[in-house]
Each structure stands twice: as structure tokens, then as C-alpha cells.
Amino acid sequence: EDYQLGNYANFMHKEIWEQPESVRRALLGRLDERFGTARLGGINQDPRALRGIRRVKFFGCGSAYYAGQLGANLVEEWARLPADAEPASELRYRNPVVEDDTLYVAISQSGETADTLAAVQELRRKGGQVIGMVNTVGSAIARECGKGVFLHAGPEVSVASTKAYTNMGVCFAMLALALARIRDLSVSDGSRIVAGLDALPSLITEVLAAEDEISAVAKEHSGAERMFFIGRVRGWPVAREGAQKLKEISYVHAEAYQAGELKHGPLALIEPAMPSVVIVPDDELLTKNIGTIEQIKARGGPVIAVTNASLPEGLADSVIRVPRGEPELDPILFTIPLQVFAYHLAHHLGRDIDKPRNLAKSVTVE
Ligand code: AGP
């Protein structure tokens, strides 16, 4: 159609670079600076209806499911409502308990993923309150949900999702903010988050400006046959999506693990041929994450730290720097350098980046 490659070598690279603009589109007309909140036309804005929600369940497949974990964390942190994420492929078959006061959020770039569509149908059949957070207008999931929030990422061609994933995070942040501001989140905290969302496009531009340095780190590690991606709490969805991007397009075996779980088994895998990408936001868990890096180093494992903190000199073998934003939004921002890392590692290995083997852009069959 009229979505062209232009001067880019492939669509994944183009879509990575489109992110400042696509995030701007997702935010357009949806932020309310005065009240420090977000207005999402597709959900019932009546405060009493929103206050009736007692739990939020996100569901989708693959990266959409990982994005859902990011969304669930924000809903819990800001709105103090219990929230979680589940793969739609599980939800559809496990006969879920459906509650009246739960908001079910179906997530999909294509809007055509068979498992996600089936989960929507099962929940709706049981009377569940389902909204769609979908990128493709007029798609099956958008139509089945009937209401929801469009991601406005624009067309995404590359099998590996980038800009749609990021816009999922941005739209979940706005949903969490709206739910939080009719509960206990203060105007000043709301305004801080609105400003933080507004700042995201320029922070993403800063990340992308460091592409050459990230590419050099990727090249250095392109001989590895396997890698760990380690994060905790805010870093956990980042680690999962980072591992997902790397395995999809480079075929390097990448496993995401929660930092605190390493000592319960996976530490046995650490050795010089197993680099770990460790997500280290400068938040209240910084010293814990530094401890994790020390544990890995003590066992001879190379470490690539992805951080906006000033780490002790020589702690990590390579450092990918991320600019500072609002800490709760770090999971959105920290994923961008990992997209760039996966892209360049796959590029160094000569992979067919837009069309990785065995994968389809949208999985419309079971
Ligand atoms: C993302 O990089 C993957 N290609 C894949 O996990 C994808 O997110 C998943 O298939 C869900 O697709 P959807 O968002 O179109 O429903």
C-alpha cells in the first residue's frame, strides 16, 4: 500500500525510528495537564463506572502479553487495584472465573490473533466487561470488543513488533493514570506522570541517537549462542520483551529471568559463554540489581547493563545508557535500546530481519 520503506534497509529499522512520532500520536488529545489525568474516549468516562472496577486483567499473545505485564504493574502501582496479565492462549481454555467488577483488556497489534479473539469471545459470552487495546481499526478483535482504545502506532510490517509494543505501554500508562486519578493518586503525581508521558518522544529520540554505540555492543556479543535477560519488578517486562526481540530475529537462544530467581536454579548456567543483559533502572531496587550483577560476574558471566544509573566503574563489561525519565515509565523507555540491540545483533549475523523463519506477522490460526 502507501506505507513505504523509504531510505531504510528494512521495516523493523524504520519502525524503530518512527517511535518518537508514533508515541506522540498515541498521546495526542488524550492528556489532561490541568487535572493530571488522561482521557480515553473508548472507555466509559463516568467516574462512578470507573470506580466500580475492582480488578484489571490484561491478555494477549507474545509481545502483547509481555506489554500487558507492564500495564498490570502500572495499574497496581498507581491505582492500587489488583491487576495481572495472562497469555490469551491460556485464558481461552482454562474456564476462567469471570467477575462483574473486573475490567478485561484485550491487547493486539493486528487485531486478528486467533487466540486473543477466542479469549474475548469466551469472556464476553460469560458476561465479562472487555475492552480492546488494538492497533488496527476495523480488525476482528476491535469489532468483537466494540469499545476500547486504539494504539495509533500506524501500520507495522516487520514481524518483530516495536512501535506497536511501545504504544501499548503508553496507552496502558494512560489507562492506569485514568483509573488512579479517580482513586488515590494526587493531582501533583498525576501531573508529574502527564509531563513524563509528554517527555517520552524526546527521550526515545535520545536513545536512538546512541544507535552506533548500541550496535557496537551488539557486535561484540554477536558470537554468543545464548543470553540471559535479567530484570526485577519494573525491569521484568523489559527483560522478557528484550529476550523475545532477540530470539525472534537473531535465533540466538535468549531467556528472560527474574533477578531474584537466579539463585534458585539458573545461576548454574552462568559461564563465560553466557552473557547476561541486566536491566538496572535507577530506582529503589538499584542496590539489589547491582548485587545481581556481582553474582553473575563472580561466576564468570559477562554482563551488559542497561541503565540510567551511574554504576561503579568496571562493574559491567558493557553499558547501554538510557536517559532519565519518570521512574514508573522506565519499562517503556528501557525496551527501546533492546530493540536496537536485537536489531543490530541480527544484522551482524546476516538474518532476514523483517521475515524471520517460522513466524508470521499475525497468527490467525491456532
Ligand atoms: C512480536 O514481536 C511477535 N511477532 C508476536 O509475539 C506478537 O506480538 C503476537 O503474535 C501478538 O500479535 P498481535 O499483537 O497482532 O495480536
Image (tube, rainbow, N blue to C red):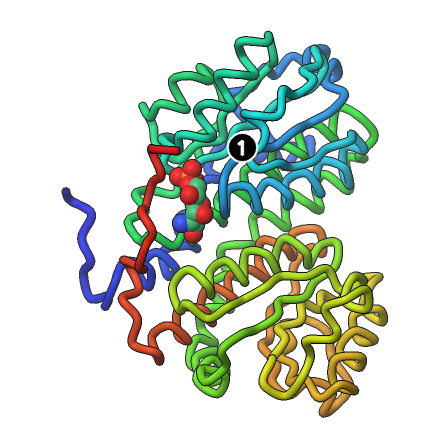
- Residue 343: x %, y % from top left: 39, 69
- Residue 41: x %, y % from top left: 51, 21
Image quarter of the N terminus: top left
- Residue at 53% from the left image edge and 16% from the top image edge: 122
Q: Residues within 10 Å of mark 1 (few under 14, many from 20)?
A: many
* Residue at the outermost left position: 1
Lateral position of residue 3 relative to residue 234, left or right? left
Label 1 CB-ligand 1 distance < 8 A: no
Residue bearing mark 1: 88
Image quarter of the C terminus: top left
Q: Quadrant of residue 295?
A: bottom right
Q: Is residue 190 above or below residue 360?
A: above
Lateral position of residue 2 relative to residue 145, left or right? left
Q: How many marks overall? A: 1
- Residue at 71% from the left image edge and 51% from the top image edge: 328
Q: Quadrant of residue 51?
A: top right
Split into quadrants, the picture shows ligand 1 in the one at: top left
Camera sees residue 4? yes
Camera sees residue 25? no
- Residue 345: x %, y % from top left: 41, 76
Task: Name the element at disc 1.
Answer: helix
Tell which of 158 and 212 is nearer to you. 158
Q: Is residue 68 above or below residue 114?
A: below
Indicate the amino acid at tag 1: Ala
Tell which of 33 and 61 is nearer to you. 61
- Residue at 36% from the left image edge and 39% from the top image edge: 363
* Residue at the outermost bottom position: 314
- Residue at 54% from the left image edge and 25% from the top image edge: 92
Lateral position of residue 355 relative to residue 301, left or right? left
- Residue 154: x %, y % from top left: 33, 42
